Amino acid sequence: MNDAAIEALRRAVAAAPDDVDLRVHLGELLARSGRTAESLAEAAVALQLAPENLAAQALMRVALDRSAAPAEPTLPHPGFDWASAEAQLDGTVPPMFVTQGAPDGPVFEREASTITFADVGGMDRVKERLDAAFLAPLRNPELRALYGKKLRGGLLMYGPPGCGKTYLARAIAGELGAAFINVGLADVLDPMLGVSESNVHEIFQQARRDGPTVLFLDEVDALGQRRSKMVGNAMRGVVNQLLIELDGVASDNDGLFVLAATNQPWDVDPAFRRPGRFDRTVLVLPPDLTARRAILASELTGRPVESIDLDRLAAATDGYSGADLAHICEAASESALLDSVRTGRVRMIGMGDLEAAIREVRPSIGEWLDIARNVVLFGNDDGSYSELRDFLKRRKRI
């Protein structure tokens, strides 16, 4: 019965790969059926889609605990014919533990980033901060040597979801003329003991070998979560290995630039914020007026539009994230499409469609702002979130 349910769920997940609840349900069934490795894989993908999902986190803990438990040895029947079994499976099942000719470790895709700051509309304050804290010292080695400026540590970008942190990381890679490696939780986690730590090491080694490279750790709160909150010890090794590699960057960083992004910086282990690691932080806020206009223009490019007042739309979407703006354009396009189907007459996307979409789509960062408010009020003793506090004051959230 479980096998039939698992196969049905697999088909459902294949049809809706971004449905986290469905994927977690599949992982739970796999775990109950003793298929721990498959359960762990589903948990990893679910956490990559929604790192804060409590059910996915619980599934990951269960799967990791079961994968770490020693399996009871099973002995073959005394009369088992090994030679016959091998002959039957030859060419069907690949041999285990054969390393000859295999690569030393996983190979991570390097992208050639063609995006620069010129492609990022607005956000001048963020670009200035990034340039002053990160890019200017890298571009001016002579001045760096004159002032004794050390290229130590990395850069952590934080802020509400959907506000362009990954896009900015690609733009930094483009500004530096460096390749771009995007690393998430699923790229690191492995059910085999010690392999996750090995994956972390190989990621950094490949980035060092193939420099210049921007190594981007996406959703670093999932990879580098607070060790004090960990129930099991499986992820502790990953956090420790990341810290070791970041310390190594301080002495062997030629051509390697480490960036990270998170929506929840308060969930990142404090050790990551020490000097020489992610000691520079940049708050990436919802797009300003200029950025909103640029995003709307980009999202509407290639669509059949007429009489669109971008300035009016940008002014009406204060507080919306970049992802929200993309959703507004998609909703307006859908409205025009359905109307064309209903009337049998193709029409253009107009201001009415977009303004109706703005009324329907609410800003998605409200929950994040509520969490941030509590952090600023009760967890900002060292002043780490002073810039965030100023933003919340301007938004009349505190």
Image (cartoon, rainbow, N blue to C red):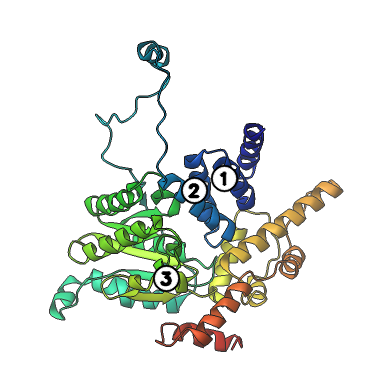
> Where does label 3 land, which residue?
157
Q: Position of residue 190 (x, y in %)?
A: 40, 46
Task: Name the amino acid type tagged 1.
Answer: Gly
Q: Are marks 2 and 1 in contact (CB under 8 Å)?
A: yes
Q: Nearer the viewer, mark 2 or mark 1?
A: 2
- The image's mark for residue 27 is 1
Q: Which residue is mark 2?
A: 63
| Place of residue 9 in the rendered image (x, y in percent of width and height, measured from the top left) | 64, 39
Please identify, in this view, whether the residue under mark 1 or under mark 3 is nearer the observer: 1
| Residue furthest to the left | 146
Q: Residue at x 55, y 74 (%)?
A: 286
SS class of the residue under badge 2? helix
Q: Could you tell me which residue is drawn at 61 percent across and 53 percent down?
A: 302
Disc on the earlier residue, 1 or 3? 1
Q: CA distance from mark 2 to mark 3?
A: 31 Å
Quarter of the image where one finds residue 272: bottom left
Q: Which amino acid type corresponds to the residue marked 3 in the rendered image? A: Met
Q: Position of residue 13 (x, y in %)?
A: 62, 42
Q: Earlier in the sequence, mark 2 or mark 1?
A: 1
Which one is closest to the eye, mark 2 or mark 3?
2
